[in-house]
Amino acid sequence: MSEQGNNTNFGRRRFLKGTAAAAAAAATMRPGYVAGAEKTVKIGFNAPLTGAVSAWGLPGFYGCQVWADRVNKAGGMKIGNTNYMVEFVRFDNEYSPAKARTGVA
């Protein structure tokens, strides 16, 4: 390799190492990050959120979000002796039984 090639060649490994380090730093700098951060309970929401029947799926999801916001604002949901923040994880099954099965697997 020429000298010029060494000066201008950033290198895939160097790029990946730098990217991984930046991602790790960003993950620990998010707001509310503390060593003993809050615990979260995730609840799945499997419904048609797009398409012709999204008119009943979306309001259901939005209603769950309203409830989760209220619970979280009050300090979370108590399970045993521990409070957990609530997070809904949505899955758009597009009113397809096959996709709905995928969403619960």
Image (tube, rainbow, N blue to C red):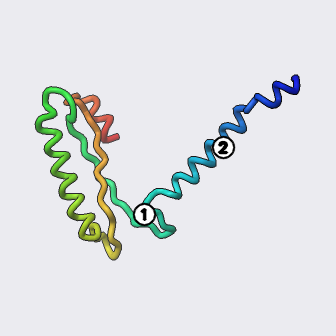
Above/below status of 42 relative to 49 = below
104 or 94: nearer the eye? 94
| Residue 56 x/y as whole percent | 11, 38
Image point (62%, 42%), residue name = 19
82 or 21: nearer the eye? 21
Type of amino acid at the residue the image marks with label 2: Gly
Type of amino acid at the residue the image marks with label 1: Gly
Image point (32%, 70%), residue name = 83
32 or 40: nearer the eye? 32
Quadrant for the N terminus, please: top right
Q: CA distance from mark 1 to mark 2?
A: 25 Å
State the image quarter where residue 100 is shown.
Answer: top left
* Residue, disc 1: 32
Residue 18: mark: 2
Quadrant for the C terminus, please: top left
Above/below status of 74 relative to 61 = below
Image point (17%, 40%), residue name = 58
